[in-house]
Amino acid sequence: MINFNYESDFNLDNEEAIATWLSAVIVSEKKKEGEINYIFCDDDYLHKINVEYLNHDTLTDIISFDYTVGNEINGDIFVSVERVEDNAKDFNVSFEEELKRVLVHGVLHYCGYKDKGEEDERLMRLKEDEKIAMFHVEQ
């Protein structure tokens, strides 16, 4: 089950469509959907988590805590709406497009994709694009 939680004034307009898409992404990677919680927050909220749990004193758009067991995807994905807005401007894309990229990025991590090295990052971007395209096809 995919759950959406809000620690800021932001709310998704299309929770059902987003959840359906993310579920399809999980199936497309031959994984089983467990419980995935998205928590939308602001920079301050996510910065505190970054410092407290990861010992990183930086702003970020997403932090994911992976509780996957075997083939069943489980986890908590924290998203800074402020970072997504800024990144959308920086990358010259719509907020909606950048938000989809961040949402699927967390799930792809749970599916085993990494983004620390150059080759891993390239594969992650390709997978993000592939999965974002799935959203457009189904809607």
Image (tube, helix red, strand yellow):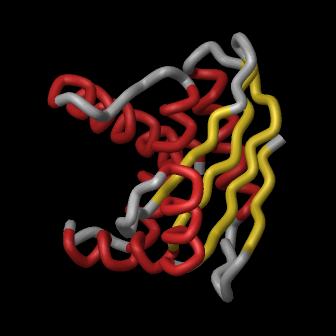
Residue depicted at 66% across the width and 17% down the height: 31
Q: Say above or below: 62 vs 135.
A: below
For this orientation, the residue located farthest to the left is 118
Q: Nearer the viewer, residue 72 or 18?
A: 72
Residue 16 locus on image (x, y percent) = 76, 57
Residue 84 locus on image (x, y percent) = 41, 70
Q: For the N terminus, which image quadrant?
A: top right
Q: Say above or below: 138 vs 126.
A: below
Residue 9 locus on image (x, y percent) = 67, 88
Left or right, residue 117 beside residue 61: left
Residue depicted at 60% across the width and 59% down the height: 78
Q: Nearer the viewer, residue 114 or 100?
A: 114
Q: Nearer the viewer, residue 37 or 51?
A: 51
Residue depicted at 44% across the width and 45% down the height: 132
Residue 51 locus on image (x, y percent) = 49, 62
Left or right, residue 31 beside residue 118: right
Question: How many numbered marks have been drawn onto this rendered protein structure?
Answer: 0
Left or right, residue 54 beside residue 127: right
Residue depicted at 27% across the width and 69% down the height: 93
Q: Say above or below: 102 vs 87.
A: above
Residue 18, located in which quarter of the rendered image?
bottom right
